[in-house]
Image (spheres, grey):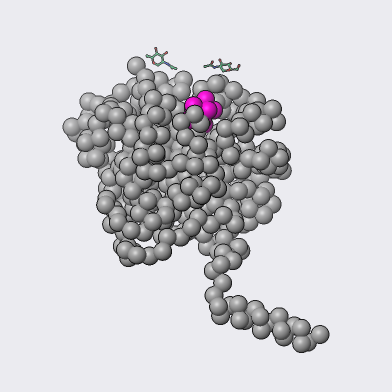
Amino acid sequence: MRPSLCYIPLFLLVQLHLVFARPLFPLPSKTGNEEKKPLQTYRPYNIAHRGSNGEIPEETAAAYLRAIDEGADFIETDILASKDGALICFHDVTLDDTTDVAMHKEFADRRRTYEVEWFNVTGWFVVDFTLEELKTLKVKQRYSFRDQQYNGMYSIITFEEFISIALDAGRTVKWAGGKKFEDKFVDTLLKYGYKGQYMSETWLKQPLFIQSFAPTSLVHVSKLIDSPKVFLIDDITVRTQDTNQSYWEITSDDYLAYISNYVVGLGPWKDTVVPVARNYLMSPTDLVARAHAHNLQVHPYTYRNENHFLHFNFHQDPYAEYDFWLNTVGVDGLFTDFTGTLHRYQELTSPHPKDETANNLLVKIAEMITAYEGQ
Ligand SMILES: *[C@@H]1O[C@H](CO)[C@@H](O)[C@H](O)[C@H]1NC(C)=O
Ligand SMILES: *[C@@H]1O[C@H](CO)[C@@H](O)[C@H](O)[C@H]1NC(C)=O
């Protein structure tokens, strides 16, 4: 038996906007009548990968709220379905690596082995648990070298809870789901007012991207909702989940021309854009240039501060990595585990033009006059 819901992840990015009522997760910064901030569109997007999961366990309300506080343009989530069909925010098909399920004696007999994408995987599968059971678990940090102090504090959240964070707060979210719940996924989005083509007035009110590694899934979803879609691309050795196509095939000019009818961009694993050898980056491929030629954005994943993940070229400096990807490669958005770091980098190097205070403007005018007088 295969867990039928888990194979074809469908990822979604929802921009968070309003700062009003928060029925499910009260925000400390809630003020009740704060002006909503429009999505910035003048510089590449800061996409909080599973929330600010470098700091707080992934895909929890706390991780998303932290990312919003830190300046994310979008928050990203993955969507899976529980045994009773509830859509939840969770990345892995098993609960083992990011929850305390192993400590729950009542679930000891729930371990199973299923074939997942051509491999046998043993563990506690999300699809074998009802939402009520999932809510009894606590989420923990995936990596041992990250801050463990939040382990055991937060629960798994539902997709609707995630949307409520997005609608109430003011920045970003993502979800992924299996093919069987694409319809339910789209229904949920429409219920909360998410729709509209990229940069349309409706979209700018509630921006989101829907993402998937499965091209047929994106084509299917295109018939249901006009929100912008992003085609996710894995390592060059990995074939597409549904159509079993190679990386070379799906990044050919012919294929980019075809997929550009359905998607606004590509979300490639960053090592496929710039190949790596012995932990050094090699020369960039022409993927970004060719994607741009087809009017496709490029949002690579995933940027992480730790030296574990930084290639040697960057000398343990995540700012050097952002500089390279933004200014040399020229990408349009970045998935990061550390939204705060990317936000600070962008604020330093490309602050919002409208953020200029009257005082800054006066200083600039004074400098212009001084320069003129000095001539
Ligand atoms: C998974 O395990 C089952 C039962 O042992 C076996 O029949 C099957 O061939 C295995 N599949 C893979 C992909 O290894
Ligand atoms: C996918 O395609 C490759 C290359 O043609 C082939 O070797 C492999 O068996 C295919 N996998 C499936 C599941 O069809």
Q: Is residue 221 visible?
A: yes
Q: Quadrant of the C terminus?
A: bottom right
Residue furthest right as drawn: 375
Image coords of residue 120 (percent x, y): 41, 21
Image coords of residue 49 (percent x, y): 46, 46
Q: Which residue is rendered at x = 36% and y = 31% of the image?
A: 184
Range drawn in magenta: 213-221
Q: Is residue 63 visible?
A: no
Most common SS among magenta residues: helix
Residue furthest left as drawn: 106
Q: Which residue is rendered at x = 28% and y = 48% of the image?
A: 154
Image coords of residue 27 (percent x, y): 31, 59
Q: Which residue is rendered at x = 45% and y = 28% of the image?
A: 8
In the image: residue 249, left or right of residue 119: right
Quadrant of the displayed image that contains ligand 2: top right
In this view, the residue in front, 325 or 361, is 361
In this view, the residue in front, 193 or 218, is 193
In this view, the residue in front, 16 or 59, is 16
In this view, the residue in front, 217 or 121, is 217
Q: Is residue 50 magenta?
A: no
Q: Is residue 182 above or below residue 173?
A: above
Q: Is residue 214 magenta?
A: yes
